Amino acid sequence: MKRLVALVLGFMLLATASFSADMDLWKKSTLNQILKRGVLRVGLEAGYMPFEMRSKTGKIVGFDVDVAKVMAKAMGVKLKLVNTAWDGIIPALMTNKFDIIMSGMTITQSRNLKINFAEPYIVVGQTILLKKSLAGKVKSYKDLNNPKYTVVTKLGVTGEFATKKYIPKAILKTYETEPEAAMEVVNGKADAFVYDKPYNAVFYAKKGMGKLVFLDKPFTFEPLAWGVRKGDPDFLNWLNNFLRQIKHDGTYDKIYKKWFLSNKWLKDVQ
């Protein structure tokens, strides 16, 4: 009998300890902090069409922004967008400047060493905007792998990593922003711009028609996902369930069609 009582007490102590540990995790969870604060702080860099960009009135708009609005509403909190330079966006997350990165970020192994990612919400790949005079001469990224060509992209993004990996012989130049790099090709100062397909498709439609050649077949596989701080299973669980919900109730499709299957918004952005 004493042994049975001791076993019961032992199980009760273990259960209490486990419950206490779970409560400690919840108190530290970003999700709990968001609910207590009443504000979801989203880190992004406004410059990646059509995910996040400035409207002509200076407002930050885009696919990620619309999803963030739905996310904040689902939490019952307000939304605050924190525009952050790309090279500092992961350090800013890690130092609690905001709660989540929603900025078209590709999952890479090096990034995953620093932060965690929710399930991918979209898959893209690198494509090429080519100088018009090279039409027919350059048919894929393989043809650009020559020191006579100058390839441009944005600094610190997967376009840079992919160029170094797949087009190592070309001269690579990087720029602080996507438009700055892409305009080098439009102005004839570079041969090709390497970047994600959604951005290239929009840039081509807006500024490259008749001036550039769009090689639109992606030559890389890049899942984009939301980034969060490590050690927060509660927040990751909520985000993954939120993503599944909006992908099955029509919300995701509605936002996707607005930004990827229509160009009506082009007239309203810078």
Image (cartoon, rainbow, N blue to C red):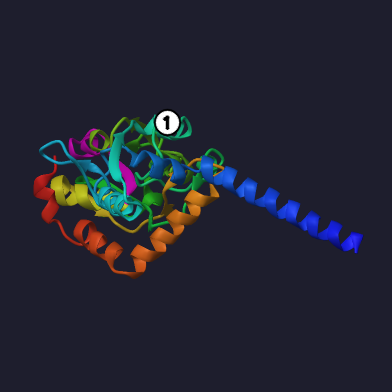
Query: Is residue 220 visible from the viewing direction of this image?
Result: no
Q: Nearer the viewer, residue 28 or 8?
A: 8
Check residue 241 for magenta coloring. Answer: no
Q: Residue at x 53, y 40 (%)?
A: 28
User: Furthest-right residue in view?
Assistant: 2
Question: On the picture, is 97 further left or further right than 20?
Answer: left
Amino acid, disc 1: Ala
Quadrant of the rendered image containing residue 247: bottom left
Q: Is residue 35 above or below residue 84?
A: below
The 10 Å Cα crowd at callout 1, few under 14, some 14 to 19, many 20 or more, is some
- The quarter of the picture where the N terminus appears is bottom right
Q: How many marks?
A: 1
Highlighted magenta segment, given as a residue range: 182-196
Residue 261 image point, x, y percent: 20, 62
Q: Left or right: where does residue 51 sit relative to residue 109?
A: left
- 155 above or below 32? above
> SS for tag 1?
helix
Residue 75 percent location from the top left of the image: 35, 52
Say which residue label 1 marks.
92
Q: Position of residue 12 (x, y in %)?
A: 74, 56
Residue 253, can we see it? yes
Residue occupying image coordinates x 48% and y 49%: 235
Most extreme residue toward the front, as rendered?
A: 1
* Nearest to the observer: residue 205 or residue 250: 250
Q: Position of residue 24 (x, y in %)?
A: 59, 43
Dividing the picture into quarters, in which one does residue 242 lie?
bottom left
22 or 99, nearer to the observer: 22
Residue plotted at (91% across, 59% down): 2
For the C terminus, the image quarter is top left
